[in-house]
Image (tube, grey):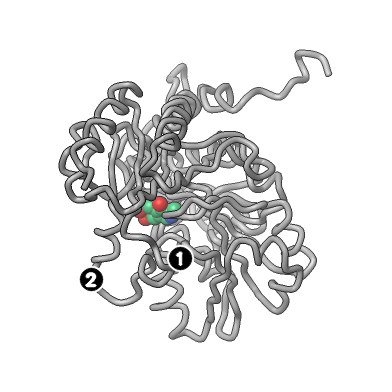
């Protein structure tokens, strides 16, 4: 291959100018509707003979610019944006499932995805079974009779990685549609479509945005799958991505690659140093090549202590780590499992999947890595019982 034929790297793809008339960014097309010049144009659009934008619930140029960037990033044919990550998850599941269908889902799935399966899909006659990752990889008949394999790799909370190529091959053999929530790795560290997975879903609120200022979601897949989502979920469920959020996400994507490299460097440092501490039982943070196709760790990990760390005291002693949900922004966060275990309401997934009260989740932000480590080391010192 000559240098000219070499496909551009992701950082280069995401830096491409996509405005018009010399503008390096697309405009925010802040409108609800688009009018037609003539009866004939209007009729053509309604009859499906043109794709002129008509109404922002289903089509908007700023949103389309973001979708094109995401399709390119994940190596998919097409993409569709949503109002939130959970809207992307639930809209996709609803578009491909019907009563009587079965879903095979990974354990430790994102808590609200679990609640959707249990509180909304199950009453509609769609049953979800939860399996350990090893069963997805090693039991060739696990997916027999299943309609959708719902995956995360790594999973939420305990960040266990899955061999996606293996699972995708099992899914293909049984005619099962495979979906993965790829929010943790981002296309920088994992491109599931290339491994044979059918549909990639993101909470774009996390690393895609990167700035903790947007709630959004996106789905990337084949032209046919995305056409089905456009046909069913945008017009009929209506959880569309707004033009301004799409514009913020385009801005986020410009720096995705360098941000992920920085998150990875800080995470590498934390994994090394945390693993060396005698009172740390486990560091959950799959790194490069822990499964085929995963090329780096992101900044989201969890740590399990041996019981000798007073977790509320640790959380309160940290200065650079703020307490909160979400992750993937510039700021570092700690989320103790004890808080999740205490969450009120039915279907607590942390209780269901048996998460240890000695676990804390860390989202390592873009602050200086040594500052973050000094903060953590000092807070741990103050929290020993
Ligand atoms: C946050 C999150 C979601 C939900 O996304 P929202 O944008 O908050 O709706 C889905 N999956 C994972 C893994 C998440 O962390």
Q: Nearer the viewer, mark 2 or mark 1?
A: 2
The answer to which of 50 and 370 lies nearer the viewer is: 370
Q: Residues within 10 Å of mark 1 (few under 14, many from 20)?
A: many
Q: Is mark 1 within 8 Å of ligand 1?
A: no
Q: Specify the quadrant that holds the N terminus.
A: top right
Q: Residues within 10 Å of mark 2 (few under 14, many from 20)?
A: few
Would you name the residue on which mark 1 appears? 90
Which residue is outermost to the right? 1
Q: Is residue 9 left or right of residue 122?
A: right
Where is residue 152 drawn, in percent x and y?
54, 56
Q: Secondary structure at mark 1?
A: helix
Q: Is mark 2 within 8 Å of ligand 1?
A: no
Question: In percent of the image, x 51 and y 71: which residue is there?
Answer: 94
The answer to which of 328 and 371 lies nearer the viewer is: 371
Would you name the residue on which mark 2 appears? 344
Q: Is residue 310 left or right of residue 45?
A: left
Question: In percent of the image, x 54 and y 42: which residue is there?
Answer: 286
Where is residue 142 drawn, in percent x and y?
69, 72
């Amino acid at each position: 291959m000559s240098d000219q034929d070499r496909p551009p790297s992701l950082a280069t793809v995401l830096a491409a100018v996509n405005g018009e008339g010399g503008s390096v960014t697309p405009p925010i097309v802040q409108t609800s509707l688009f009018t037609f010049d003539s009866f004939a144009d209007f009729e053509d659009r309604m009859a499906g003979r043109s794709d002129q934008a008509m109404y922002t619930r289903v089509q908007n140029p700023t949103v389309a610019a973001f979708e094109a960037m995401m399709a390119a990033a994940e190596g998919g044919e097409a993409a569709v944006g949503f109002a939130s990550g959970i809207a992307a998850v639930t809209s996709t599941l609803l578009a491909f499932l019907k009563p009587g269908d079965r879903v095979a889902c990974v354990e430790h799935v994102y808590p609200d995805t679990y609640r959707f399966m249990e509180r909304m899909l199950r009453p509609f006659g769609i049953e979800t079974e939860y399996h350990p990752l090893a069963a997805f990889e090693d039991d060739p008949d696990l997916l027999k009779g299943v309609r959708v394999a719902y995956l995360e790799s790594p999973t939420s909370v305990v960040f266990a990685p899955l061999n996606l190529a293996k699972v995708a091959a099992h899914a293909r053999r049984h005619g099962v549609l495979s979906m993965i929530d790829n929010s943790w790795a981002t296309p920088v560290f994992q491109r599931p479509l290339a491994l044979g997975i059918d549909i990639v879903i993101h909470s774009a609120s996390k690393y895609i945005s990167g700035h903790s200022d947007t709630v959004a979601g996106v789905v990337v897949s084949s032209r046919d799958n995305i056409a089905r989502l456009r046909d069913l979920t945008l017009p009929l469920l209506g959880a569309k991505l707004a033009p301004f959020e799409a514009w913020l996400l385009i801005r986020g994507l410009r720096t995705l690659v360098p941000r992920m490299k920085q998150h990875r460097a800080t995470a590498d440092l934390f994994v090394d140093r945390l693993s060396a501490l005698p009172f740390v039982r486990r560091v959950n943070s799959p790194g490069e090549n822990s499964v085929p196709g995963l090329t780096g760790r992101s900044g989201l990990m969890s740590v399990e202590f041996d019981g000798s760390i007073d977790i509320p005291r640790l959380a309160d002693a940290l200065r650079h780590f703020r307490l909160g949900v979400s992750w993937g922004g510039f700021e570092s966060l700690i989320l103790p499992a004890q808080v999740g275990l205490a969450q009120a309401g039915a279907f607590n997934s942390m209780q269901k999947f048996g998460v240890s009260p000695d676990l804390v989740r860390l989202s390592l932000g873009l602050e200086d890595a040594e500052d973050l480590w000094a903060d953590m080391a000092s807070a741990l010192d103050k929290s020993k019982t």
